[in-house]
Image: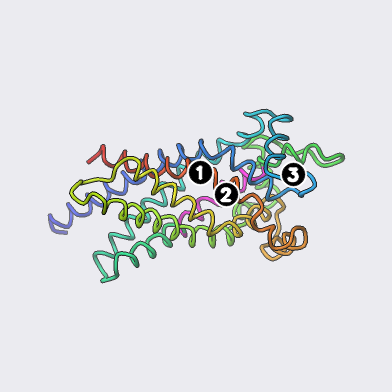
């Protein structure tokens, strides 16, 4: 290996390490902001409309009966760790794929973004599925424990994890992988493409400046979050049912249609879009800021 090739390899490794570190921090910050909203979303997706006819009824019930920490933040440790892994995977996979395509192909900038986003989302789905499985089970555990005669569910991470392993084995941790893969692959395209395109469009307003302004990064991140969640929400609903009830993708889809009709695929969308704005604005802004500090 030549000296130039060695320097190139080292630079790539340093770049990947920075993406992992910055993505991890950004992901954890975004997840902490969005988690209470996510709890409400999962409960709306998995519980009957008789229990929670509206988003507000779910929020009111959770606060009144379980409080803030035990209710809205139940099981947050797992997704905090997962968000760090997910965003580290997303950013390193996206940037490394983009660099590879620029080096070896003649694809357009938009094609590069689309391909890199799809690859990043695909990789992230394998990291995300086990984390979301535990998260979803914990988010509905308090509700299931109130059902008369029901087997009491644990509300702790480690016992929940051990129960999944005991009942379904290691592969049980990837229950819902097919739906998560679909969600993240298409979602990765929507997420990165929206962010890059909005950021680029806003930058055109002041071409002489080197970087985007703070508010432009926040708007771009918020737009990316809205595009991601709006485009893949039906797959997310199916995934939540698969993971909380340990069922197949076909049975989950059938259950949603039977229980709510096609509108059931979008149950909880409103609260999800609300959470997407601050959470994704925070993720991208934090990532960009940390990356700038290291340059």
Mark nearer the N terminus (3 vs 2) = 3
Task: Please state the extent of the stretch shown in magenta in the rendering.
Answer: 122-137
Which quadrant is home to the N terminus? bottom left
Q: Residue at coordinates 62% horizontally, 57% vertically from top-left?
A: 176
Q: Residue at coordinates 29% horizontally, 62% vertically from top-left?
A: 100
Which quadrant is home to the C terminus? top left
138 in relation to 115, above or below? above
What label sits on residue 52 in the rendered view?
3
Q: CA distance from mark 3 to mark 1?
A: 28 Å
Residue 5: x %, y % from top left: 17, 57
* Residue labelled with disc 1: 82
Are the residues flagged by discs 2 and 1 in contact, CB closer than 8 Å?
yes
Q: CA distance from mark 3 to mark 2?
A: 27 Å
What label sits on residue 229 in the rendered view?
none
Image coloring type: rainbow
Q: Residue at coordinates 40% horizontally, 56% vertically from top-left?
A: 194
178 in relation to 18, above or below? below
Mark nearer the N terminus (2 vs 1) = 1
State which mark lies toward you, 3 or 2.
Answer: 3
Q: CA distance from mark 2 to mark 1?
A: 9 Å
* Residue labelled with disc 2: 130
Q: Residue at coordinates 63% horizontally, 29% vertically from top-left?
A: 68
């Amino acid at each position: 290996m030549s000296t130039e090739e060695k320097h190139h390899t080292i630079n790539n490794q340093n770049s990947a390490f920075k993406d992992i570190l910055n993505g991890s921090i950004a992901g954890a910050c975004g997840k902490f902001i969005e988690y209470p909203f996510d709890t409400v979303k999962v409960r709306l997706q998995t519980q009957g409309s008789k229990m929670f006819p509206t988003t507000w009824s779910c929020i009111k019930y959770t606060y009144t009966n379980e409080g803030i920490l035990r209710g809205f933040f139940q099981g947050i440790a797992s997704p905090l760790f997962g968000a760090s892994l997910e965003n580290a995977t997303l950013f390193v996979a996206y940037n490394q794929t983009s660099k590879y395509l620029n080096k070896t192909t003649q694809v357009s900038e938009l094609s590069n973004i689309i391909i890199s986003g799809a690859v990043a989302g695909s990789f992230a789905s394998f990291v995300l599925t086990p984390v979301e499985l535990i998260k979803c089970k914990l988010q509905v555990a308090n509700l299931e424990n109130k059902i008369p005669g029901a087997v009491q569910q644990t509300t702790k991470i480690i016992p929940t994890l051990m129960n999944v392993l005991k009942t379904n084995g290691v592969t049980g941790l990837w229950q819902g992988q097919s739906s998560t893969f679909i969600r993240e692959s298409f979602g990765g395209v929507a997420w990165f493409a929206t962010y890059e395109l909005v950021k680029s469009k806003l930058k055109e307003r002041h071409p002489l400046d080197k970087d985007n302004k703070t508010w432009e990064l926040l708007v771009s991140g918020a737009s990316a979050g809205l595009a991601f969640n709006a485009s893949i929400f039906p797959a997310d609903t199916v995934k939540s049912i698969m993971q909380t009830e340990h069922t197949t993708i076909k049975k989950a889809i059938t259950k949603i249609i039977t229980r709510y009709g096609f509108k059931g695929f979008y149950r909880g969308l409103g609260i999800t879009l609300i959470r997407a704005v601050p959470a994704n604005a925070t993720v991208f802004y934090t990532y960009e800021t940390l990356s700038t500090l290291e340059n």
